[in-house]
Image (spheres, rainbow, N blue to C red):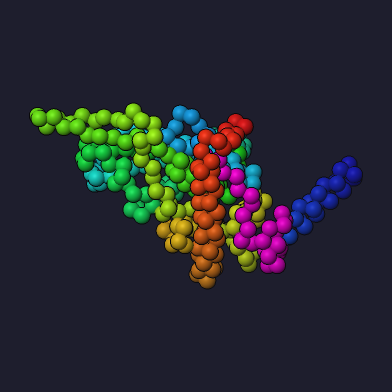
């Protein structure tokens, strides 16, 4: 019994040392895995991984694994925006990703993530929704964006935003012609050519940069251990030009105005680098065409 108690005390001591290093390390720009405060883990991006979608992408960020599929379907424009199409988001938090997603836990987080995505795309600059309009007030394209969390290893919001942008970049929408007869009735004709399609411009689609306040400093791309040591985080939605489109605080702790300003500036700086790297990877992968090696989301 004594041995067991001694082992437990040593174990708790090790936990305490690790916690102390996680909290105090950022003061010296050091983290447990060797990164600096503004460094991301290795990001793996692969597009066109699901065959029965209009566009898809898989993103691995550390131990976080995200799969996104986009399906384009015809619908009716919303009354308040008769000349535009629209996007619908659904987030599935698989219980296999982490035990915390079992029961209502996964549903609540999925709703929270979907609402955050709606906020990001609820402006005219993110995606030109007018290109999705087929016939004003009658027909438009609706993009159903399905997000599946395969594995949770920290920093979900950033990984999901990267995957959504990559999937939208990969999305191809069939070109449509509206034919009108003498009586005024309209008929819709889809092009038979698979290469005759519309591609979305994702240049202004923002990515989320999550900044976790740990001790007196903040870090980007926090691991699960770092998130457990953080009482408050700031989600900053940033475009490729460093423009902040929206912000959201998460966590039970508070953030003072000076910290918020510093975190915003870091988010803008880091976001511009993240966008540049992602855009480079996406264009390089597309330039390879059918020659590129596909791993697939089950690979």
Q: Nearer the viewer, residue 25 or 159?
A: 159
Give above or below for 211 relative to 139.
below
At x 51%, y 43%, the residue is 287
The picture places residue 289, in percent across and down from the top left corner, at 51, 38
Q: Which residues are magenta?
A: 23-47
Q: Is residue 93 visible?
A: no
247 with respect to 28 (left or right): left
Q: Residue at x 54, y 59 (%)?
A: 273
**Which quarter of the image is occupied by the N terminus?**
top right
* 265 relative to 108, above or below: below
Q: Report the front residue among 218 and 138.
A: 138
Q: Is residue 285 visible?
A: yes
Q: Quadrant of the C terminus?
A: top right
Q: Nearer the viewer, residue 219 or 84?
A: 84
Residue in view at x 31 percent, y 42 percent: 132
Q: Is residue 39 magenta?
A: yes
């Amino acid at each position: 019994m004594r041995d067991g108690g001694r082992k437990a005390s040593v174990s708790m001591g090790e936990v305490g040392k690790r916690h102390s290093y996680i909290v105090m390390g950022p003061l010296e720009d050091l983290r447990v895995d060797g990164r600096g405060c503004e460094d991301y883990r290795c990001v793996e991006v692969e597009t066109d991984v699901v065959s029965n979608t209009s566009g898809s992408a898989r993103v691995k960020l550390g131990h976080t694994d995200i799969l996104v599929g986009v399906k384009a379907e015809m619908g009716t424009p919303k009354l308040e925006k008769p000349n535009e199409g629209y996007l619908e988001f659904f987030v599935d938090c698989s219980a296999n990703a982490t035990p915390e997603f079992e029961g209502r836990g996964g549903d609540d987080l999925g709703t929270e993530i979907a609402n955050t995505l709606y906020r990001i795309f609820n402006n005219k600059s993110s995606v030109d929704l007018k290109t999705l309009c087929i016939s004003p007030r009658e027909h438009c394209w609706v993009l159903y964006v399905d997000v599946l969390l395969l594995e949770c290893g920290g920093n979900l919001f950033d990984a999901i935003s990267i995957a959504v942008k990559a999937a939208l970049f990969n999305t191809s929408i069939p070109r449509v012609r509206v034919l009108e007869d003498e009586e005024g009735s309209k008929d819709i004709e889809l092009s038979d050519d698979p290469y005759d399609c519309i591609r979305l411009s994702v240049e202004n689609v923002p990515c989320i940069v999550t900044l976790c306040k740990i001790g007196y400093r903040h870090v980007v791309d926090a691991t699960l251990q770092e998130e457990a040591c953080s009482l408050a985080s700031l989600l900053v939605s940033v475009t490729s030009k460093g423009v902040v489109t929206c912000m959201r605080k998460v966590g039970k702790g508070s953030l003072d105005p000076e910290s918020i300003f510093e975190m915003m500036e870091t988010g803008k700086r880091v976001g511009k680098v993240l966008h540049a790297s992602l855009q480079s990877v996406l264009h390089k992968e597309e330039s390879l065409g059918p020659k590129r090696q596909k791993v697939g989301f089950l690979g």
